[in-house]
Every structure is written in structure tokens, then in C-alpha cells.
Image (tube, rainbow, N blue to C red):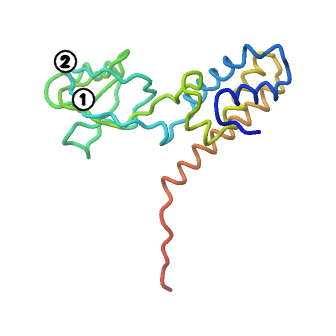
């Protein structure tokens, strides 16, 4: 079975469920699985470069669909990343000079100073309901299949299926994260003379 887009995924979930009464719920199961993916994964495919953005009144609006910050720095200070802190600590640090700290404050980041900020963010996985396909479905359709089946099992109150499908989903997500960690930390093979 090929799963390369939202329609094919919905069909595959329906086939695996083998229940005609759940067809209208399948988009919900997929959406719930996507929420789980966003909570679990932080991989290169989710990275988004934050272009130079001026800090205005110690605040920068967080780009839409941002999940987390990988790193932020001030332009010209690329080797000195800004440190995340609690909002209280950033406020207590004052608001003058060059920013060294930041904190999340609703839909903005608050800084303890000024400057122009750049960085790398993690963004939400594009939703299949609006994009039809995305990098995760293309590369790892089993994550979507078992993620949606796990949510369906919760809906059906099938504890055994919840355990099985959740374990399969977690295994795939852990493999994705593990592969990235391995690829990031491994280097080229080097021949050594004896």
C-alpha cells in the first residue's frame, strides 16, 4: 500500500481500522497524531531560519507555527547565543544595553536589551489537512499510519491496540530522532596508518 498524500493516508487508516463507522473521525485521528509529532520531534526538517529582526521595545513577535527555539543570537555576535531564561529573570535583568537573555511571553520573545536578533527555530510539521503532503509523510508514512491508529484506538477504548500502536508510533519517532542524532554526530571515515 502506497501512502504519499492525505487522501491515501485516510484510506490506509480506514483499511487498517476495518470499520466503516469511523470514516468521519479519521481526519481527527490524523490531526491528533500531528500534535503528538510536534511534541516529540525536533529534527532538521523542522528547522526554520529566523532572518534578522530588530528588537523593538525589548520584544520580537514570534513567527507563526514556531514550536521552540534551537538558538538565537544577536547580529554580529554569532558566537554568543542568547540565553533562555524565565520571564521574571529577563525583566529583573533590566532593559538597557545589548540583549543577552530572552524569554517567551505569550506570542513574543522578551529580551533584556536591544539589538537585531537572528536564529534557528523549530516549526510545526505542516498539517496534511491543508497541504496534502509534507516531509514526514513522504519520508516516514508509518509514523502517520500508526500515530492515527493509536488515536483511533483511544477513541474506541481499545487498551491493547492503544499500547501496540503507541509503541509502534514511538519506535518510528525515536528512529527518526536517533537517525538525525547519529547523522549529526558521525563524521567521515578516516584511514589511519599503522
Dot 2: element: loop
Task: Give residue 57's mark.
Answer: 2
Dot 1: element: strand
The residue that appears at 49% across and 77% down in the rendered structure is 191
Task: Give residue 20's mark.
Answer: none
Q: Is residue 91 left or right of residue 35?
A: left
Q: Which residue is at the front of the view, 8 or 149?
A: 8
Picture quarter with the N terminus: top right
- Locate residue 146, reporting x and y percent: 73, 32
- Locate residue 103, reporting x and y percent: 33, 24
Q: Is residue 56 left or right of residue 127?
A: left
Q: Residue furthest left?
A: 97
The residue that appears at 64% across and 32% down in the rendered structure is 5
Number of residues whose C-alpha sits closer than 10 Å to that of mark 2, classed few (under 14), some (14–19) or many (20 or more)? few
- Locate residue 130, reporting x and y percent: 55, 22
Asked if 12 appears above or below 76 in the picture, the reply is above
Q: Disc 1 marks which residue? A: 53
Amino acid at each position: 500500500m502506497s501512502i504519499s498524500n492525505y487522501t491515501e493516508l485516510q484510506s490506509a487508516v480506514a483499511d487498517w481500522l476495518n470499520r466503516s463507522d469511523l470514516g468521519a473521525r479519521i481526519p481527527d485521528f490524523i490531526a491528533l497524531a500531528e500534535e503528538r509529532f510536534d511534541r516529540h520531534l525536533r529534527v532538521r526538517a523542522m528547522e526554520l531560519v529566523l532572518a534578522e529582526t530588530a528588537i523593538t521595545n525589548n520584544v520580537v513577535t514570534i513567527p507563526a507555527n514556531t514550536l521552540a527555539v534551537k538558538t538565537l543570537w544577536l547580529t554580529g555576535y554569532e558566537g554568543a547565543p542568547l540565553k533562555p531564561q524565565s520571564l521574571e529573570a529577563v525583566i529583573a535583568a533590566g532593559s538597557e544595553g545589548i540583549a543577552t537573555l530572552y524569554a517567551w511571553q505569550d506570542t513574543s520573545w522578551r529580551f533584556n536589551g536591544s539589538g537585531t536578533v537572528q536564529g534557528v527555530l523549530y516549526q510545526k510539521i505542516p498539517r496534511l489537512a491543508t497541504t496534502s503532503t509534507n516531509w514526514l509523510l513522504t519520508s516516514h508514512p508509518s509514523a502517520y499510519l500508526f500515530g492515527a491508529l493509536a488515536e483511533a484506538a483511544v477513541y474506541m477504548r481499545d487498551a491493547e491496540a492503544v499500547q501496540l500502536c503507541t509503541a509502534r508510533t514511538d519506535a518510528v519517532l525515536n528512529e527518526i530522532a536517533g537517525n538525525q542524532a547519529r547523522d549529526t554526530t558521525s563524521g567521515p571515515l578516516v584511514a589511519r596508518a599503522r
